[in-house]
Image (spheres, helix red, strand yellow):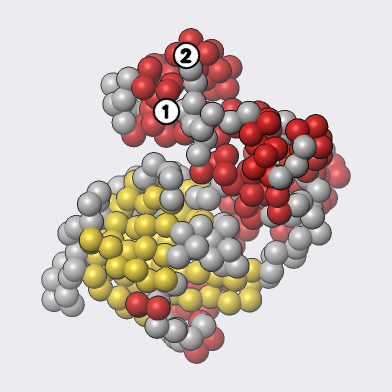
Amino acid sequence: MDRAQSINLSKALSALHLVSAKWATIDLGPGWGFSLDNDPNLIAVHFVLDGVLEVSCTHDEPQVFAAGQSFILPNGAGHVVRTGSGAKLSRLGHVGAQEDEALSAFEGEDSPVHLMFGTSRTGRPAATVLSGQIGLTWPEDLLPPRALLPKLIVGSPGYRLNSPSAEEAVRSLREMADAPGGTICLARFAHLLVTRRLREQLLQEPELVSANPRSSVAIARVVQSIRMEPGRAWSVASLARHAGMSRSGFAEKFRQETGRTPMEVVSAARMDMAARLLRRSREPIKAISASTGYSSSTAFIRTFRRHFGQSPTDFREQSGQD
């Protein structure tokens, strides 16, 4: 990242101001979960306090999070949080709004609302998650549209189930939520977490900082579509049609606003999908190659090695899948 980008990043992060927050502590019984609607004006933040949860956005493979871990949805994508596949889902609509009932903002609540699905106050839940939706000012003159960011960002990747760090994180969060003024402290903590993880994400993708801050809706929509369906047979021509632009005009505008070519973004999204499948499934390399949009395993392996510096087989072995 060059000096100009660093200055722009600092200005952008300093302009992220907290304007609203809603919180709920949610207990889930075995075979239960909940869904949250898409809301591009809010950032969803979840802290797993107990148990293990699967989280998935539309068209994406589920990710698994254990007690002590957190995850962020910076563009407010709709998603499902559950104790396992096939779980019965309760539609929240928004955090703390059971069956779309309105919930006052954090200024009027001293502690998170307590919700229970598939469990009771006397029973032990299979999992507990502290969930919030926060509103932040988004400096559009300094940051790219949220649609250009990943739908889900891991908030605390270093935690592992039953590790001392995870136990300490859970204990601290429970104390923060239960004490007087809990909701405002949680909101400030989430604000800091989101700011930190956003900085890390933009440091990994500095081209987003230098992108045209008023990126067109059409380009943002194309990037979102690529991330939702990376295995689709995308081409510059098909992406241009998706944006409603000519091929040459689209390619030039896309490069101006993202710093990358359309097919570079497609390739990166496919590699992210391939890495997830290699970590979380036992699918053969050939099947993963086809799922991620490659017509031959040879081309897939060559691209994967260039992107990650190792073969898919070596990557899987190091990730603990065999």
**Residue at 30% from the left image edge and 76% from the top image edge:** 115
Farthest residue toward the bottom?
108
- Label 1, residues with CA under 10 Å away: few <14, some 14-19, many ≥20: some
Residue 224 vs residue 25: left or right?
A: right
**Residue at 71% from the left image edge and 54% from the top image edge:** 217
Residue 182 vs residue 10: left or right?
A: left
Q: Position of residue 297 (x, y in %)?
A: 45, 13
Q: Position of residue 36 (x, y in %)?
A: 42, 65
Q: Quadrant of the N terminus?
A: top right
Farthest residue toward the right?
4
* Residue type for callout 2: Ser
Cα distance in 3D space between marks 2 and 1? 11 Å
Residue 241: image quadrant is: top right
Q: 146 and 180: which one is in front?
A: 146
**Residue at 37% from the left image edge and 52% from the top image edge:** 55
Q: Quadrant of the C terminus?
A: top left
Of pointers 2 and 1, the one earlier in the residue sequence: 1
Whether residue 165 appears in this view of the structure is no
Q: Position of residue 132 (x, y in %)?
A: 46, 69
Q: Which residue is mark 1?
A: 291
Please, is residue 245 above or below residue 118 in the view?
Answer: above
* Residue type for callout 1: Ser
- Label 2, residues with CA under 10 Å away: few <14, some 14-19, many ≥20: few
Whether residue 32 appears in this view of the structure is yes
**Residue at 71% from the left image edge and 45% from the top image edge:** 244
Q: Which residue is mark 2?
A: 296
Please, is residue 230 above or below residue 54 in the view?
Answer: above
Query: Could you tell me which secondary element the residue under label 2 belongs to?
Result: loop
